[in-house]
Amino acid sequence: MKTGGQLIVDALEANGTDRIFCVPGESYLAVLDALHDSPIRTIVCRQEGGAAMMADCQGRLTGKPGICFVTRGPGATNASAGIHIAMQDSIPVILFIGQVASHAKEREAFQEVDYKRFFGDIAKWVVEIDDAARIPEFVTRAFAVATSGRPGPVVVSLPEDMLTSLVEAPAALPYTPVETRPGETELDALEKLLGKAKRPFVILGGTRWDEEAVARMRAIAEAWSLPVGCSFRRQMLFDHLHPNYAGDVGIGINPKLATAIKQADLVLLIGGRMGEMPSSDYTLLKSPYPDQTLVHVHADAGELGRVYRPTLAINASPLAFVEAFAKCKPAGTPSWADQTAKAHAAYLDWSTPPEAGPGAVQMGPIMNYLEKVLPDDAILTNGAGNYATWVHRFHRFRRFATQGAPTSGSMGYGTPAAVAAKALHPDRTVIAFAGDGCFLMNGQEFATAVQYDLPIIVIVVNNGIYGTIRMHQERDYPGRVVATDLKNPDFAALARAYGGHGETVEKTADFAPAFERARASGKPAIVEIRLDPEAITPTRTMTQIRDKA
């Protein structure tokens, strides 16, 4: 006989869980008690949204479900921000929520929420356990659902009495991973389409990749001389200095890259959904009927034909597809090798940062410095905002599992993601980029980094405004500024108040020594860059945007 709380922890252990992220609550004290005697590491966070984003980053970097526990009501609704990210980004996450006791349901009891209705549109599956003996079954099923097809978040509601009940239940068994593989017919059809193509282009995206799959994709690109782009915030899927890399297919795309994709006669889309952002509002590939011959490879059959009608649909995970297609070789030397070389040259030019700009701090030289000193396995995380352009456009990702950024465009992600990444890889450099607005949405998780001695470095790009919104405001309503100014704390002093290391950068030359002191401190650190709000993009000032409007 075991309590429901013990059965939850046993099932997590059986399914390979090594850490969870949580904000504690009395609604699931029985689980916390069971964790006391478990080898699972429990990381307590400061807000449920941050905890859910940590679980997302864990799932993003490993491909295995990140686990988050929160309490009922406000705890669950706070966590919904991370669940929305995981859903749009196809990341395996399991959120466990303490729930009111069964006898109190449907009475609007203290902090009661109907989680099936609340999370119904932003999770793959939502279940409330009403029989403690079925806990092993439901937890293992949650792992299977979160990782199969198109991965995503699962929400498990835990009524308090289910966790304290003593029941007899079968021991939990681990879930069985499911791979969807391409058939010979599909591979033959793809070879024939490539044989007829003159201007093919490959776009990598989505999840269910690993380091071996990325290496196989590189070998495929080399064998077929294919130009390869990475979808929005999936840049870790291909080495940016490889001669076949053509650039990131995301917001603010290189115009030459956009033209190449539009003029391609064959687009091979592997793993991604090619949503609004990577498709440039459905203009690179027209929906529902692309101008290009489209071969769409996806692990979830429901995504094939959902937005675009492909010429050839291949229901396969990226991992299984590249394993199979790596055995196919071109009949001769592909005719498009010169186009691939030109695409890479255009990327190198596009990803070289400018040296000049308004104000005393120039982000271009700062990015150049970071490119020189950061190791290839450094992990970079960020949320959303114009500051992220400097990362996405000018950092050249070299290896798999080095990027943590939400394709959903959620602010507040970078700092909690960095905490999770450093907990996962304590021997690697982890850098979080954040704007001033972005940082203060989940910046309290810097305290979590201090508590667990996780020496992340947070680079806060402080321009005193909600930069992206101000840019659009000045473009659409020039000179009519409302609700986009910010009065910020001294971020370096804030870092020291938390017990970390703080630095302030007010001119370009300050950055390198400040960064080195932060790295040498051995503490979680904040390096605040005080950027002129005129420097709103790498190529345009705020005044230019306003005047053009």
Image (cartoon, grey):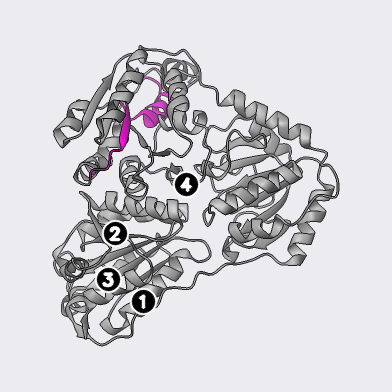
- Magenta stretch bounds: 453-479
First in residue order: circle 2 vs circle 3: 3
Asked if disc 4 and disc 3 are in contact, CB closer than 8 Å, the reply is no
Asked if disc 4 and disc 1 are in contact, CB closer than 8 Å, the reply is no
Is residue 161 in the magenta section?
no
Residue 90 visible (yes or no) = yes
From the image, state whether disc 4 or disc 1 is nearer to you.
Answer: 4
Mark 4 Cα shell of 10 Å, populated few (<14), some (14-19), many (≥20): many
Q: What type is the residue that disc 3 sits on?
A: Val
Classify residue 4 as left or right of residue 390.
Answer: left
First in residue order: circle 2 vs circle 1: 2
Mark 3 Cα shell of 10 Å, populated few (<14), some (14-19), many (≥20): many
- Residue at point 60% right, 65% down? 301
Mark 2 Cα shell of 10 Å, populated few (<14), some (14-19), many (≥20): many
Q: Position of residue 62 (x, y in %)?
A: 44, 55
From the image, state whether disc 2 or disc 1 is nearer to you.
Answer: 2
* Residue on which the image places disc 1: 138
CA separation in Å, label 4 and label 1:
29 Å
Q: What type is the residue that disc 2 sits on?
A: Ile
Residue 20's disc number: 2
Nearest the viewer among 480 and 384 is 384
- Residue at point 21% right, 86% down? 1
Q: Position of residue 501 (x, y in %)?
A: 22, 30
* Residue on which the image places disc 4: 401
